[in-house]
Image: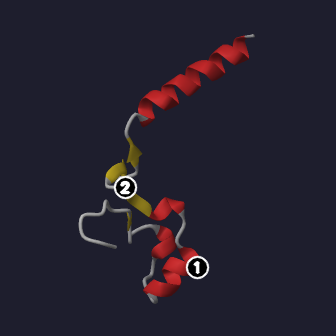
């Protein structure tokens, strides 16, 4: 870390089932945490995911559904 550098930060949701019952935080993070525990992701100072939502996610899902539907009709 250095002053003026852009941040990389991962925020976890401590209420995710994988992290409960909070007996040992270090152990929970090393052995139990997984991608579903990630709430917010900041990379190079840019928020890539906030509250488990990625910007444009709905549009990507809708396009994938449309393409899948078109493929099934062939």
Secondary structure of the residue carrying tag 2 is: loop
Instruction: Assess disc 2: are there few (<14), some (14-19) or many (≥20) residues with their C-alpha within 10 Å of its C-alpha.
Output: few
Q: Label 2: which residue?
A: 44
71 vs 7, nearest the viewer: 7
Q: Residue at x 51, y 31 (%)?
A: 61
Q: Is residue 68 above or below residue 16?
A: above
Horizontal side, residue 36 vs residue 11: left or right = right
Residue 55 screen position, x and y as percent: 37, 39
Residue 63 screen position, x and y as percent: 52, 23
Q: Residue at x 31, y 59 (%)?
A: 6
**The N terminus lies in quadrant:** bottom left
Q: Which mark is residue 18?
A: none
Q: How is the image coloured?
A: secondary structure
Q: CA distance from mark 2 to mark 1?
A: 27 Å
26 vs 16, nearest the viewer: 26
**The C terminus lies in quadrant:** top right
Horizontal side, residue 25 vs residue 46: left or right = right
Q: Is residue 46 above or below residue 27?
A: above
Q: Residue furthest right?
A: 74
Q: Label 1: which residue?
A: 31
Q: Residue at x 52, y 86 (%)?
A: 27
Instruction: Assess disc 1: are there few (<14), some (14-19) or many (≥20) residues with their C-alpha within 10 Å of its C-alpha.
Output: few
Residue 71 screen position, x and y as percent: 70, 17
Q: Residue furthest top?
A: 74
């Amino acid at each position: 870390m250095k002053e003026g550098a852009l941040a990389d930060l991962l925020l976890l949701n401590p209420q995710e089932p994988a992290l409960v019952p909070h007996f040992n935080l270090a152990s929970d993070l090393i052995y139990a945490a997984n991608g579903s525990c990630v709430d917010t992701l900041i990379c190079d100072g840019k928020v890539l995911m906030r509250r488990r939502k990625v910007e444009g996610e709905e549009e990507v899902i809708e396009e994938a559904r449309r393409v899948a539907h078109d493929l099934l009709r062939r």
